Each structure stands twice: as structure tokens, then as C-alpha cells.
Amino acid sequence: MDQRKVIILTTIIKNYLETGEPVGSRTISKFSGLNLSSATIRNEMSDLEELGYIIQPHTSAGRIPSDKGYRFYVDQLMEKQERALSDVKSSMFARMERLESTLQALVRNIASDTHYAALVSGPSMQKNKIKFLQLSLVEKQKVLFLLMFQGNIVKTITLDIPEDLEQAAILSLNLLLNDVLAGFSVEELGEKDIRSLMDRTPYKATMETVLRGMQELLHPEEEEVEIYTSGATNIFKYPELTDSENASKLISALERKEELAGLLKDNESEEKGGSIQVYIGKESPLEDMADCAVVTAKYHLGNGMQGTLGVIGPKRMDYEKVLKTLTNLIQDMERSF
């Protein structure tokens, strides 16, 4: 089919979807963007009718889409979405590789500059806004559910759905999911949004399955946050931390990534007043660091992505230097992203 026919068919379908009324040549001339005479448009409509893409109700001179026309329209939409998604995935992987290498370099720089142990958490998604949602039919009663956040961060899950749905039904679910949920962060979604989704679809059993899958993506039992560390051996430069018991405790603590993640996440909580926190001795949330000082600082990469930097050293650490180093590095990092 040539491009002119595609534009005319798309215009007919979009107008019919919006109004429910047969579409005539005058409407096509107004909304298609084509500089064609009414006679030329009618000739093209006649060709589309012969090809089976549109039909003429006997009560009207206008045309409406046939099943074949709807199928062409939906296939075009899906192809366009797949192309866009492919581009986004390429961009996403490049961005994530860049972010990971940046965090690894950052933690090494902190350890080198301060001469203490350093740690950095990868960005959390909880405050990030949802950019796009898509269901893709993999096989009969099985879909791939894709959830994309601002910054082109993607999470996916494969779901078995209870209904045998055609592509048109999947498309209607995609449109509804994006209409209701896109633009909101994980924290902003509430019961009213869920009720709206259930009320507005005839495919309630499938929507319920999708919502359970989304819950699993948005609220995993433990959000996977990458922790990068460097400079653990720096602690042996300080006599008060080098006796066998203290050294063993600290090395062990630095190897327990889940506890380190909890320490850094504590800094990100809303209850904490500022972006920088200093824990001295027993103030530390980690018992094995009761003989240390811990300084943590939040970083923000935009689009709701945030994480934390940390420095672990003796209680007699050079606090002024550590605070200055973290502040400068965070500013450099946030400018880069």
C-alpha cells in the first residue's frame, strides 16, 4: 500500500475511533494533512474499499474501517512501538553501562582521596516516575510485561494470563495502562488508580494478573540495589582499628552487602533532615562499626533516581576533608547525568 493510502486509512480509523461516525472526504481533507482535492480523496477511498480496508454503510456516504483495516492499523502501531522500544533499549543499556562504570570509578576516587573505606549504592527506582508500560503477546495466554521508568530504566516480567486475547485486546490494555499510570512514581500510585484500571476494562481477569505482576516489579521483597566498595584495606592504617577483633568485624561488615545497603538506604529515608549524615561510634546503625565514624551523602541523578555515597574510617577521621570530597564528587556526578 502506498503512503498516501496509509495516511488516508489512518485518518479514517482515528476519526472513527474518536467519533463513531462514518468519515467522509471533507474530514479527511481537514485532518490528514494531505493537499488533495475531494475527488482525488474519493478515488483513494474507493481503492481502499476495493482492497477491503474500509466499508461504506448503506445509510451514509462516509466510510468506516473493516476488520482488515483495524488489523492493518494495529499492526502498524505495534511495529512502531517495537522500533521505538528497540531504540530505547539500546539507549538504556548504554546509559546503565556508563552509570555502572561511573559508580565504580567514583568509589575508587573516594577511597583514594580520603584514605578511608568507601561505598556507593546504585540508584533506587522508588521515586522514579513511570514513563511507559507495554504488554506484548509472546504466545497464547502468555505476555511479556514491560515497565519503563524515566531515564529509560526497564523492568520486565513474563505473565500467564487467564484469557485468550487477540492483539486488539492487548492494545486496548496497553492504552489503558499508560493512560492511568504513566507519569506517576511508584510512591504516588494508590488504590484509586487500581480501581480505575479494573473499572475501565472488560478484561478484568487479565488486568488483575497484570496488576499482580506490576506489584512484583514495583515492590519486590528486597529491592535489588547494587553496592560498590573500595579501600577496605585503608582501615589497617589506623592503630585503633587494627587489632584482630576490630579488623575482623570491619572486614566482615564490609562484605555483608545487604547490611551496607540498609545503612545507605537509611540515609535516603524522608525522616533524615539533610542530604549528609554523620554517625560517630555507637550512633552507627551497624553494630560492627561502633568503633568507627561513618559519613553518608545522597546523590540525585534526576528522574527520581537517587542513591548514597559513604565513607567509613576511624572516629578521628578528617571530617572536613571527607565532607568536602563527597560534596564535590556529588556535584560533578549530578552535572554528568
Image (cartoon, rainbow, N blue to C red):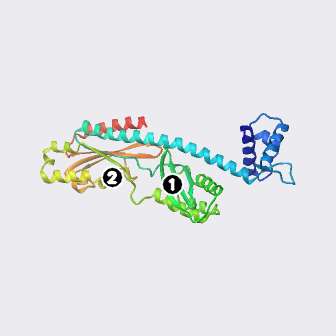
Give percent across and percent down for residue 273: 37, 49
Q: Which residue is mark 2?
A: 261
Task: Relative to 275, say whether 288 is above or below.
Answer: below
Q: Is residue 336 left or right of residue 50?
A: left
Check disc 1 and report its element: helix, strand or loop. helix
Tell me the quarter of the picture where residue 235 sits. top left
- Which numbered dot is residue 197? none
Could you tell me if residue 320 is visible in this image? Answer: no
Q: Is residue 218 left or right of residue 183?
A: left
Q: Which residue is mark 1?
A: 188
Give percent across and percent down for residue 54: 78, 49
Give percent across and percent down for residue 277: 31, 47
At label 1, the amino acid type is Glu
- Mark 2 vs 1, N-terminal side: 1
Task: Relative to 123, say whether 37 is above or below.
Answer: above
In which quadrant will I find the C terminus? top left
How busy is the neighbourhood of tag 1: few (under 14 within 10 Å), some, or many (20 plus)?
Answer: few
Q: CA distance from mark 2 to mark 1?
A: 24 Å
Tell me the quarter of the picture where residue 5 sits. top right
Between 125 and 8, the one nearer to me in the picture: 8
Residue at 66% x, 50% y is 74
Task: Relative to 95, say whether 17 is above or below.
Answer: below
Task: Relative to 198, say whether 68 is above or below.
Answer: above
